[in-house]
Each structure stands twice: as C-alpha cells, then as structure tokens.
Image (spheres, rainbow, N blue to C red):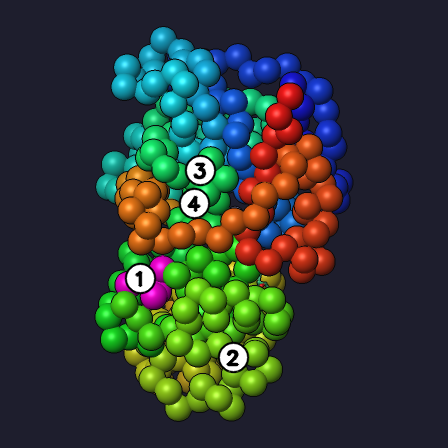
Amino acid sequence: MFAARYEPGRKSLIVQDIPTPELRPHEVLLKIQAAGICHSDLHVLDGEVPFPNSFTMGHEGCGQLVEKASEAPADLKIGGTYAVHGPNPCGNCVYCRTGHDNLCNDPGRSWIGLGEDGAYADYLKVAARNVVEVPAGVSPAVAAVATDAVLTPYHAMKTLANIRMEQTVLVLGLGGLGSNGVQIALALGAYVIASDIRDSSLELARTLGAHEVVHAQELDGKVKGKKIDVVADFVGRESTFTQAQMLVRPGGIILLIGLGASNVPLATVAAAGSEIRVQGSFWGTSVELGELLRHIADGKIRPEVETGNLEDVSNWLEELRSGKVRSRMALVPKVA
Ligand code: NAD
Ligand code: ZN
Ligand code: ZN
C-alpha cells in the first residue's frame, strides 16, 4: 500500500510501497478517507521535535472500518466511518482511568503518526479503543481535522481555560488550529479578538465572526488596556508569548499551544506580580473528541477545511510551510 514515511534525520517524507498492516487481537483496520496536515509535522521534519524511529506520518485520520480483530468490541461496525484519537492512549494507566487520556504515558505506545504509523497511507491499524464513530452528516475531511485542529483548541479553551460568556479572549495565530479556536471561543460566548501576520488569516477570522481582527504588528497599541481574560497562543514564538504576557489581565490565563520555538521567555516579576497563569495544553481526550463530533454534526462548530490529494502530501506540507494553506488541509485519496 501507499505510505508517506518519516525517517530520522530526513527533512521530507519518503513515499513507499509497504505491506497492509496485520492486526493484533484488539485492533481495527481503517481504509483512510481523509488525513489532515498539521504544522507539527513540519516541526518534526525540521528536527525540532525529533523521533528516533521511522513511521508513517499523519496524526489527523478518518477512515472506513474494513476489518476488526477478535477482541475488538462488537459495536464497531464494518463499513462505518471512524475518526482516530491520535494520542493513542493505553486505557489502563492512571491518566486514562481518570479522564485524562490525552496525557497517557504508557511506555509501550506512541502517538498515531508521531512515533507510530499514521494516516498518510491507504490503510491505518489502530487499537479499537482509539476510534470514535463519526456522526451522520460529518464528512471524512471534517472529521479528520476535528481530531486535532478542532480538538486541541476545544480542550484548551473549553476544558482547561473554562472560557465563559462575557469573557474576552485573544487568539494569536489563525491557521489550522487558531481559526477553529476563534469559532470555539465564539461558541462559548466570548468576546473574541483575533490576530495574525497574514492578511488571508485576518480575512478568515472576520468571516468567522471575530469581534475584532488586528494585525500582529498593531496589536499592542490597539488592544492594550482591554481586560483580556484568556490569551490563546497558537504560535508559541518569543514574539507571541511576550505579547500574551503584556496583554493578559492580572490573574488571566495564557494558553500555550503553539510549538513555534523550543523555549520562550517568561518575565518573572510581571508574571508573579500579576498572578498570570501559563497553562500548557496538549491535544484532547477521547471523550472530548466524541462530544466535539456531535457539536459539529449539530452545526454548532463548522470546521474550516480545504482538500487536496493524499498522494501529494509532500507538496502540501511545503505549501503549509510557505503560508499558502489558509485554514486546514485534509488530504483525500484519489478515487481509483
Ligand atoms: P498553521 O501553520 O496552520 O498556522 C499558524 C498560524 O500562525 C498562521 O496563520 C501564521 O500566519 C500565524 N503566525 C505565524 N507567526 C505569527 C506571529 N508572529 N504572530 C501571529 N500569527 C503568526 O499551524 P497549525 O497547524 O495551526 O499549528 C499551530 C501550532 O500549534 C504549531 O506550532 C503546532 O505544532 C502546534 N500544535 C500544538 C498542539 C498541542 O497539542 N499543543 C496540537 C497541534 C498543533
Ligand atoms: Zn497536530
Ligand atoms: Zn494510558
């Protein structure tokens, strides 16, 4: 089968013809219908987040269930469409058992498409517990991007920051994650200020209904003094993290989601003196993914998605790198 694979030290994927995976008793096989591309793939390929082993990339996957092994639950349906919960939790550790399965640290597993084989392939095998049924009316492309580009801001903004009506939220970086972050903050009832360096992103945020849209270079002057309860940093560079610290209100929350730099500075006196809370945020739980897919089916969140051919994944990664992907790209296999 087709697979686009990461090799340690290589800056681009290698397309290979590899055997279709064989299932272990608790696994299912999905025929990939859509795979989203994330900026994290570029951080991995650029060596900023290296992995010691080779694997098929693609951590936003959705596919048709075509085979299930002996121990897979009876309610999983052959022919059904399922989204993949990328953190690939074990189900048994203390994090999994206490509802924090995004933080699973079982040593025997890795994240799907980031350490373990992922969705840039014809087929993907995954533990049966780590697929979530896609509700009727949600396309595979939308379901694929829901697994990270929507799930990650949902977990950060709803669960961790507990954004509520009447709060003011500043969203920094309006790409795949941030554009969905704008929608989620709006759905939670917040007053939303959106910022980016790209005109296409600012335009997108306007069409999504952000209350204020401000170019990153003008942000400090235009926003300073407003009571910003939560800053969601979907970039994670020195410039955005510094802006976040300057603009968040005393006692407010900075959501650290973007991984643009491996280190960012924190101003100790200002952060301590105004009791700023810096909240790291990682992906999302399987319960949240199910909940989110139902919100999407109900039309409460309408993920922005563009589509391209899965076989052209390397080209699309370069388009993402050069800032030409406006929202989130889901790649679909060519119809044979
Ligand atoms: P993307 O490339 O689709 O979007 C990035 C956006 O940031 C673009 O719109 C870009 O114009 C904007 N930007 C760049 N520099 C900026 C600046 N200085 N000020 C304002 N905006 C700026 O990327 P994505 O796929 O949405 O991912 C965003 C980040 O989140 C990446 O670093 C990715 O690795 C990370 N990520 C983290 C998690 C997590 O669980 N914490 C999950 C997925 C992705
Ligand atoms: Zn990702
Ligand atoms: Zn676990």
Spot occupied by residue 257 in the image (x, y as percentages of width and height): 47, 59
Mark nearer the N terminus (1 vs 4): 4
Q: Residue under circle 2? A: 214
**Label 2: element kind:** strand
The residue type indicated by label 2 comes to Val
Tell me what residue is drawn at x 52 percent, y 49 percent. Answer: 305
Specify few, some or many for label 2: CA neighbours under 10 Å numbering under 14, 14-19, or 20 or more: many
Looking at the rendering, the stretch of residues picked out in magenta corresponds to 184-188
User: Does the CB distance between marks 4 and 3 fall below 8 Å?
Assistant: no
The residue type indicated by label 1 comes to Ala
Front: mark 4 or 3 = 3
Q: Compute the Cα span from label 4 to label 3.
A: 10 Å
Mark 4 CB within 8 Å of ligand 2:
no
Mark nearer the N terminus (3 vs 1): 3
Spot occupied by residue 140 in the image (x, y as percentages of width and height): 47, 35
**Label 4: element kind:** helix
Mark nearer the N terminus (1 vs 2): 1
Q: Compute the Cα span from label 3 to label 2.
A: 32 Å
Q: Residue under circle 3? A: 139
Mark nearer the N terminus (4 vs 3): 3
Q: Is residue 109 above or below residue 237?
A: above
On-image quarter of the N terminus: top right
Q: Compute the Cα span from label 3 to label 1.
A: 21 Å
Q: Residue under circle 1? A: 187
**Label 3: element kind:** loop
* Quadrant assignment, res 209: bottom left
Q: Compute the Cα span from label 4 to label 2.
A: 26 Å
Q: Residue under circle 4? A: 146
Spot occupied by residue 155 in the image (x, y as percentages of width and height): 35, 53
